[in-house]
Amino acid sequence: MLLAVDTSTKYAGVALYSVPTSETGRVIASRCWYSSVNHTSELMPAVSQMLESQRVALADLTGIALALGPGGFSALRVGMSTVKGLAFILGIPVVGVGTLDLEAHPYARAKVPVCSILDAGRNEVASARFGGNGQRIRDDTVSTVPELLEELANLSTPSTGSHQTENSRTLLCGEGVINWGDFIRERMNSRAMVIEPSPATRLSSLCQLGWHKLGQGEVSDLVSLQPLYLRMPSIGGPKRRDQVPQSS
């Protein structure tokens, strides 16, 4: 039984994933909620209520999948500390998955370029790009939306080296679509397929990718595992916008 935990954005969630022998895994329970500042007080009660509703004990868990971000500092730390604590007490493995990967996962077989976005504040977004085969094209990056759209307009097709044509389309998805979907549609017109986000779908992706990683032995080290922050918190001067570091 896998526990999935996502506190990487304002739409938090937890889920239980069961994989019976010789059967396809499925989400047997999930809870999603809007949490602007209360991840600390809401996370463990949500986990406890979900486990109780399914008559599942903590001892029944065999692993935990955690959404790593990018996201806000406080929200990510809540999820990270909670998951590390549970894993240590229960003696079970943890796997971390980037949130932008989770947003893009449902469209891995769409056979079109995919760009997942998350709101980064300050009129910026965090984004990741994927090819039509679901493989990453670049790391997570923070930029303004016009900068991102310029990148998409100028990208080249790897197989031909030619620039994107007027008929080429990019699928844009992720929670950042909530604030930026209309702007993207206006700027890109028919070249954009904008998909509205679903916290429940992201949780399902976390379960699937987390279980796959566990099966492949891609277990995270509890000591070195760190979230992917949009920006490191600091006191004083302005922060430099730069590439978000990746974590394995």
Image: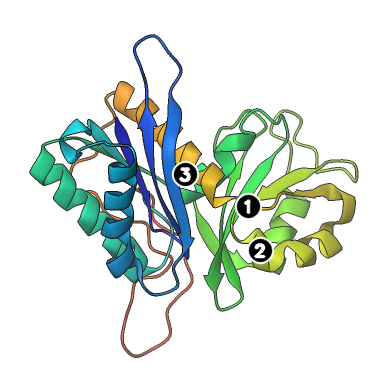
Q: Earlier in the sequence, mark 1 or mark 3?
A: 1
Q: Earlier in the sequence, mark 3 or mark 2?
A: 2
Mark 3, residue position:
203
Residue 139 left/right relative to 214: right
Q: Quadrant of residue 106?
A: top right
Give the secondary structure at mark 1: loop
Q: Are marks 1 and 3 in contact (CB under 8 Å)?
A: no
Residue 243 visible in the shown view? no
| CA neighbours of label 1 inside 10 A, class few (<14), some (14 to 19), many (20+) | some
CA distance separating discs 1 and 2 = 7 Å
Residue 234 left/right relative to 59: right
CA distance separating discs 3 and 2 = 17 Å
| CA neighbours of label 2 inside 10 A, class few (<14), some (14 to 19), many (20+) | some
Numbered mark located on residue 197 in the image: 1
Q: Position of residue 163 (x, y in %)?
A: 80, 43
Q: Position of residue 8 (x, y in %)?
A: 41, 58
Residue located at (84% from left, 41% from top):
168
Total tally of numbered discs in the picture: 3
CA distance separating discs 1 and 3 = 11 Å
Residue 30 visible in the shown view? yes
Closer-to-camera residue (73/27): 27
Indicate the amino acid at tag 2: Ile
Residue 147 left/right relative to 223: right
Q: Are marks 1 and 2 in contact (CB under 8 Å)?
A: yes
Closer-to-camera residue (111/149): 111
Residue located at (53% from left, 46% from top):
200
Indicate the amino acid at tag 3: Leu
Work out whether 95 lies above or below 150: above
Closer-to-camera residue (114/197): 197
Residue located at (36% from left, 37% from top):
16
Tell me the quarter of the image containing the N terminus: top left
Mark 2, residue position:
178
